[in-house]
Amino acid sequence: MDYFTEQDCIRAKAQKQKFLFIYFIVLAVYIAISVVLLVFYLKLPYKSPKISTVKWIHYPITGLFVVFSFLFIGIPIRRAKNYYNIGATMLFGRKDTSQGAFFKYDNSPQFKDGISFTTLIFIEWNETKKEYFERKILLFEDKPIPEFKENEIVKYTTQSNILLSYESLEDDEVSEEN
């Protein structure tokens, strides 16, 4: 079953573009207000009492725009950009297919490239070291968590330990592959 698809990447790109569009609209409104206030300021006579009024209007607007820019670029735009970058890497990067026995869910948040993940832990055989080890597979926090029973054998495809797809194997399929 596919867990991360090309459609997820397309949605992330659309979300990133939507956030950028919103930001540029706010920027255009700020620039328009600033130009109107500048033109009004330049047309005022020397030592006019309205000069301070123009400044008292423009300073708070500038402060709000700066705070908005830091927050909006720093949180939603950056998160959407990171999500899209991870998605593009997952689609075109090197994929790794393995199988292991499901061990447990780890709901403590894990962060990778600014994105929050939950973790599935599998027990996997290492052919080189000839021993079992725990493998942590990352799942996007905003996607549903697949339901596995303890010790259920699962074949999964990952890209840099982020789950792309999985398939629950039956006992006869496991014996054929080993």
Image (cartoon, grey):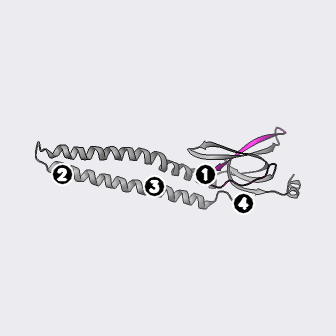
Neighbourhood count class around disc 2 (C-alpha, 10 Å): few under 14, some 14–19, many 20 upward: few
Q: Which residues are magenta?
A: 127-151
Picture quadrant where residue 66 is located: top left
- Residue lying at 34% horizontally and 46% vertically, measured from the top left: 64
Q: Residue shown at 71%/55% (left/top)?
A: 146
Callout 1 touching callout 3 (CB < 8 Å): no
Identify the disc placed on residue 14.
Answer: none
Neighbours of disc 1 within 10 Å: few (<14), some (14-19), many (20+): some
Q: Main secondary structure of the magenta part?
A: loop
User: How far apart are the two marked residues, 2 and 4, measured between alpha carbons?
Assistant: 62 Å
Q: Secondary structure at mark 1?
A: helix
Question: Mark 1–mark 4 contact, CB under 8 Å?
Answer: no
Label 2 sits on what residue type? Phe
What's the CA distance linking mark 3 and mark 4? 31 Å
Task: Name the quadrant of the N terminus.
Answer: bottom right
For numbered disc 2, what is the local secondary structure?
helix
Q: CA distance from mark 1 to mark 3?
A: 21 Å
Q: Which mark is first along the chain, 3 or 2?
A: 3
Q: Which mark is residue 19?
A: 3
- Looking at marks 1 and 3 on the same chain, the residue that comes earlier in the sequence is marked by 3
* Residue on which disc 4 sits: 1
| In front: label 1 or label 3 | 3
Residue type, label 3: Phe
Q: How many marks?
A: 4
Residue 41 in percent (x, y) is at 18, 48
Q: In the picture provided, is 121 more to the left or to the right than 85? A: right
Residue topped by disc 1: 89
- Estimate the spatial distance between the alpha carbons at disc 2 and disc 3, rounded to whole Å: 32 Å
Against 16, residue 74 (above or below) is: above
Please, what secondary structure does the residue beneath circle 4 have?
Answer: loop
Please indicate whether residue 63 sits to the left or right of residue 101 in the image. left
Write down the residue under mark 2: 40
